[in-house]
Image (cartoon, grey):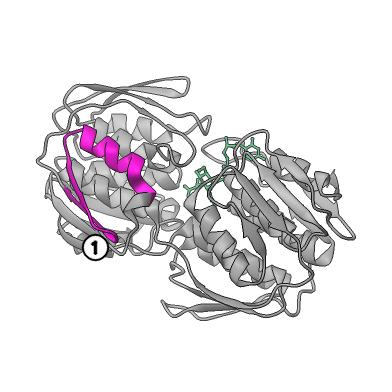
Amino acid sequence: MDKLIIRGGAPLRGQVEVSGAKNAALPAMVASLLTEESIRLHRIPQLGDVRTIIGLLNHLGVSVEGRDREPISLRADRIDRFEAPYQLVKTMRASVLVLGPLLARFGRARVSLPGGCAIGTRPINLHLAALEKMGATVSLDAGYVEAKAPRLKGARITFDGQTVTGTENLMMAATLADGVTVLENAACEPEVTDLAALLNRMGARIEGAGTPTISIEGTSHLHGAEHEVIPDRVETGTFMVAAAITGGDVTINRCLPYHLEAVTEKLRETGVRVEETDCSIRVVGDGHVRGVNIRTHPYPGFATDMQAQMTALMSIAQGSSVITETVFENRFMHVNELLRMGADIKVVGTTAFVHGVPTLSGAPVMATDLRASASLVLAGLAAQGITTISRVYHLDRGYESIEQKLLGLGASIERVAE
Ligand code: EPZ
């Protein structure tokens, strides 16, 4: 296992280009299951979760070609397995996305229940209830979901809670169903909208993606397509916080600022200067930020995936802040590690009470989940002294070439084998 060694204190300066969005790339790659024709995807980031989904798709019989920045081509013309095994699903919950497409195209699927993860139990009950409304028979067997449906039928489905991958699973399933499906209380995340754009390029008939009501008119067949996934809004936000926490001046290129309005507004509230064009964001910090209160919400509210990063920033703010996590029940794993660096944070239930301290001190810390590890990198960049972060495989799941990008901005960071 690798670890990162960071010497903090240097303001980050310069330009950085973000990669394609992990959470758009994963469903886009899974959408290849819906047709026997080839899907060609651009801007797929080279990172852990993408390698995991490629492993799962290969297991099912999908051929995947292309690596190292060239477009990835996927073709599901020889699917001979319909099972997503526990070994693969337990490492990445997004594997459950194969459920809808396998059921829609082949009428059967056997997918391991994902189990919990560091940030919460993360059930898939909303996915399963919705598929049953479309006529699937769903049963649980030895930790696996067994689903069967000769042909899914269009239905009106109201999600009992907003679920991003639940919306994506059902949107994909409905593209090949008999009749029209309407999803109410659907997730509005940009990654849902991006998936709908790909599916419509494949011949699907989806309207309303990006709003709480999505309608999908089923069709008998989808064809191949080419698509470039959207830039990663969470990586963009992470670099914005990196500029703020180090008092630097960073321009993030090839991003979509309108995907980050809630984060931008919060950063401006702390006193940080943020300038936007239609495809770039410049963040200028002066080494002082004010404490602000944050409450995470589904899109377009403040993204839960940016909460840990903002908690790191608030730990050196002037004044206090109250940070409430409303989406996941256990997403403060980064706090114990920040405390080791001298932060003053108290967690009560799903709320963190942060009192800003003048500076953090470098220390050995441990990554526990993807965004918690990003939070520790940010804290290390701001801290006085050396911070060593272990178990960085968590970070590698969702950030492409993070240390190269940070080195390009003047950070003192290196990766060593543990
Ligand atoms: C997606 O996860 C993202 N992952 C997560 O990003 C992100 O944090 C999350 O959406 C919220 O924005 C991908 O897109 C691959 P949910 P997802 O279903 O779809 C509960 C990252 O860091 N729920 O929207 O799994 C669930 O427990 C990752 O990149 C049910 O109760 O999240 C949670 O409390 C982390 N039953 C809430 O809903 C269900 O059937 C939101 O979950 C489904 C969800």
Q: Is residue 398 left or right of residue 145?
A: left
Image quadrant in which you'd find residue 36: bottom right
Compared to residue 67, the image places residue 350 above or below, namely: above
Residue that protrudes farthest toward the top in the picture: 348
Q: Which residues are magenta?
A: 259-283
Q: Residue at x 33, y 62 (%)?
A: 18
Image location (x, y in percent) of residue 3: 34, 54
Tell me, yes or no, if residue 180 can be seen here. Answer: yes
Quadrant observed for ligand 1 in the rendered image: top right
Residue that protrudes farthest toward the left in the picture: 286
Front in this rendered view, residue 79 or 336:
79
Q: Secondary structure at mark 1?
A: strand
Which residue in the structure is indicated by mark 1? 16
Q: Residue at x 62, y 44 (%)?
A: 213
Image quadrant in which you'd find residue 357: top left
Front in this rendered view, residue 146 or 295:
295
Q: Residue at x 61, y 49 (%)?
A: 165
Q: Residue at x 51, y 72 (%)?
A: 227
Q: Is residue 71 left or right of residue 224?
A: left
